[in-house]
């Protein structure tokens, strides 16, 4: 993606006049104008903060839910997650902790005090276990490309190249601070890695099914009981074939696989008519279920799973002494 491409902006035709005369938080395309005034490499933290906190907060949250879903399609990843027992015993806390840590990084920046605290927690949790660099790179790549793909399908406006590139630069810097090696140097190269990894590693595994089922059960639990059977089928309808087969889930009916994306596109048409968001939703998610009163009532250092006490020591990076 060249310099000329990075400056290209896909602006809905109906919004061009408002974009030219608007201001961030005042007119519908004011934040977009702010984004394209920034440099996607130098200012990537600010672009990610605006895009995920003001322009597409719901879309980014849902995209990252399904991004994590994809990481469970690799048996080497799902087997470790299954061994920790976190998904079986504390799925909501694990989900909320992950969401908070990612939000802290995007809202405050990875080199801020809060960002460094979040990275320490992330590195502390990953450092306990034996995880391959390739698996770590893949998980990181999903945080770049799954939100891009989601917004391209269901966002209220197209993403700009600034936003795509900023996401790449942002998570590459996060990955470096996590000690992940051999992160590709370009957006396109990292995307090729993402696609090739899935082609090589996605396959059915019993632990995939366990973690996938725990995750579906978690998503379904957020809805009133009478709606849960339909929600369960809707979640499966959103999974593409490689993901569905990796979990061993039965396919959703064809009509539902058409209806769910159509409903999400209808939602985007409504959102397009709404006024711009004036405050970031990144670190102020009212739907957090683990920490009442969020965004207060927790400290970053206390997030994450406790030290494992009942796990096969082969998974541990530092095996206990006999």
Image: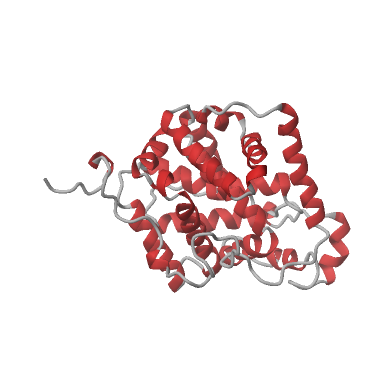
- Report which quarter residue 20 is drawn in: bottom right
Residue 42 visible somewhere in the drawing: no
Q: Nearer the viewer, residue 41 or 198?
A: 198
Q: How is the image coloured?
A: secondary structure
Q: Is residue 202 above or below residue 65?
A: above
Q: Spot the residue most to the front.
A: 226
Q: Residue at x 59, y 58 (%)?
A: 166
Q: Spot the residue most to the left.
A: 322
- Tell me: 246 left or right of 47: left
> Where does the image place residue 284, in percent across and percent down from the top left?
59, 67
> Where does the image place residue 317, in percent across and percent down from the top left?
26, 47
Residue 177 visible somewhere in the drawing: yes
Quarter of the image for the C terminus: give it.
top left
> Where does the image place residue 90, in percent across and percent down from the top left?
43, 50
Q: Is residue 284 above or below residue 251?
A: below
Q: How many marks?
A: 0
Q: Residue at x 56, y 65 (%)?
A: 45
> Where does the image place residue 218, in percent across and percent down from the top left?
53, 46
- Tell me: 181 left or right of 187: left
Q: Residue at x 30, y 44 (%)?
A: 130
- Tell me: 61 left or right of 176: right
């Amino acid at each position: 993606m060249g310099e000329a491409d990075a400056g290209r902006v896909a602006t809905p035709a109906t919004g061009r006049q408002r974009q030219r005369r608007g201001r961030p938080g005042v007119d519908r395309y004011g934040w977009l104008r702010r984004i394209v005034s920034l440099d996607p490499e130098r200012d990537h933290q600010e672009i990610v903060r605006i895009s995920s906190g003001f322009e597409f907060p719901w879309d980014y949250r849902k995209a990252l839910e399904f991004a994590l879903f994809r990481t469970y399609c690799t048996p080497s990843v799902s087997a470790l997650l299954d061994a920790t027992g976190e998904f079986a015993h504390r799925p909501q806390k694990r989900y909320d902790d992950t969401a908070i840590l990612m939000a802290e990084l995007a809202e405050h920046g990875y080199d801020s005090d809060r960002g460094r605290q979040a990275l320490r927690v992330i590195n502390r949790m990953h450092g306990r276990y034996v995880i391959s660099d390739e698996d770590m790179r893949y998980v990181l790549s999903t945080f770049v490309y799954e939100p891009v793909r989601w917004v391209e399908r269901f966002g209220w406006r197209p993403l700009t190249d600034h936003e795509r590139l900023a996401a790449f630069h942002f998570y590459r810097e996060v990955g470096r601070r996590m000690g992940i090696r051999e992160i590709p140097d370009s957006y396109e190269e990292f995307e090729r890695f993402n696609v090739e990894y899935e082609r090589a590693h996605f396959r059915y595994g019993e632990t995939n099914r366990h973690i996938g089922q725990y995750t579906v059960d978690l998503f379904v639990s957020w809805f009133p009981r009478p709606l849960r059977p339909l929600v369960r089928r809707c979640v499966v309808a959103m999974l593409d074939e490689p993901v569905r087969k990796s979990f061993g889930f039965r396919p959703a009916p064809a009509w539902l696989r058409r209806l769910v994306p159509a409903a999400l596109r209808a939602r985007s048409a409504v959102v397009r008519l709404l006024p711009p968001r004036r405050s970031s939703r990144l670190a102020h998610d009212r739907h957090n279920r683990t920490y009442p009163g969020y965004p207060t009532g927790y400290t970053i250092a206390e997030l994450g799973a406790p030290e494992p006490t009942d796990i096969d020591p082969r998974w541990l990076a530092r095996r206990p002494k006999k």
